[in-house]
Amino acid sequence: MSDGDDETPADDGEASETTEITVDSLDERLESAESALADAETESDLDTVEGVLDDIESDIESAELPEPDDEDEEAPAESLTDRLSGLRDDLEAQRGPYAEDVIDDIESSVSKIEDTRWTEQGADEIADAVAEFAEAAGEILDGDFAPQGHDEESLVAALDSVATTVEAAGLDPDEDDETIAALLEATDALSTGLEDAQEWDDLETNEQLMAEGFYDVLGHFKDFPVEWSALKEWEQRSRPDMVLLALNSLQSDFMERHCLETFQRMGQAAKTEAVVDQMLQRAGKRDKPAIRILGKMAAEEAVETLVEYVDADKDPQLQKVTFKALGEIGDEAATQPIADKLDSDNPIIRSQAARALGLLGDTRAVDPLSDVLADDEEDTVRTSAAWALRQIGTETALEAAAEYTGDRAYNVQMEAESASEALDAGTPTA
């Protein structure tokens, strides 16, 4: 009968395909997976459990599980997912240990050694930590990894040697688990030793300065703070490295200002790679004191950066400082950009551009400066042009300036007379 046919049981294959996924069935499968995880002894066992968990996760996502009537009650899908996540965490914790973990730990220690600035005490402490690790690794791996010295290169070489040996050993997480665990214990001790070693950043500012010998020059001093007295002494000794140390260490506007003023007074005596780099960083942020210093140091490295500010018409003070600095540096690459500013609407900018051209000394500027001297409406600008021609100092430049000994502007007359005297004395530069 049809009713009877409808109730005929399906075969096993059809039953497995149509079995309904319920909260209870998923809960039972999670309990079974938890038991299997507890009994797992090898990586292969753990891989099997992981596959089971993947299947359960897929079923949780695809199943139409009931929603709770009370909105404050946790949904069954959420509860099952939480249990699944916990089992995955337990599974990962049960894996290993792996030789790759040992190598990763060693590489982290190498990076720590190379990237950290250590104090003298810290350098001794990291050498001891690496030596102890090398000894422990030697006992575990039956090798000799003792560092050949206490310098950073020797310490890193010793650690790299251990890592290479571990990688070549092909340690199995099941068969060699005790060896790997012993190595990880040794890397943990190494990491702790490096963390406990004294770093430069661990010191207070005055301790850093003291460690670098900044205060060694102090005898009887009158100025306060004492760092200012030391700064003055280092300036007298032409030690820009100590001035830079103070600038980078002392976080006060007072000392920053005095450090920058010191560099400016020192001029080319302050020109070291470290100082130039620091001033270039500041100049890149339009820092005017740094630009002045780069000019006083005649730092050719700054020309490319400073030329970009020649057109900073909205900041005339920046232009003024930049023109002078470029003039003092004396690189003729700045001649044309500055000469273009002789047509500026701002007479102050025209005047500063003229003086910068005089400092540059490029003979290509003689004609435009002569035009300014002849045609500019502002006598201050004309005076600067006459001064610039006199600084360039060639016969042509001096003759152009000397034509104005009877000029209406007194200052132009003075510059013209000086140019004329230079011609009479036969002292043109070319």
Image (cartoon, rainbow, N blue to C red):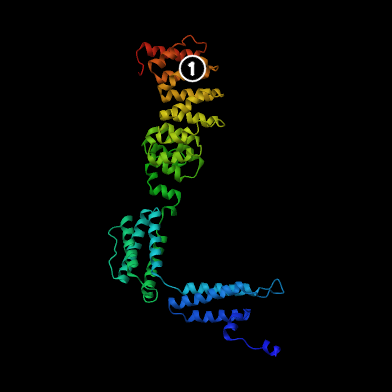
Query: Is 197 situated above or below 426?
Result: below
Give x and y (percent) for residue 44.
44, 77
Quadrant, the C terminus: top left
Residue at (70% x, 90% y) in the render: 1
Query: Is 61 situated above or below 259?
Result: below
Label 1 element class: helix
Residue at (41% x, 55% y) in the render: 199
Give x and y (percent) for residue 425.
35, 12
Give the camera-side residue of 352 and 61: 61
Residue 151 can be seen in this image: no
Query: Is 46 situated above or below 411?
Result: below
> Disc 1 marks which residue?
371
Residue 10 can be seen in this image: yes
Give x and y (percent) for residue 310.
50, 30
User: As shown in the figure, which amino acid type bears the numbered disc 1?
Assistant: Asp
Q: Residues within 10 Å of mark 1 (few under 14, many from 20)?
A: some
Give the camera-side residue of 24 and 165: 24
Residue 272 occupies which quadrant of the picture?
top left
Give x and y (percent) for residue 365.
44, 22
- Is residue 29 found left or right of 295 in the rendered image? right
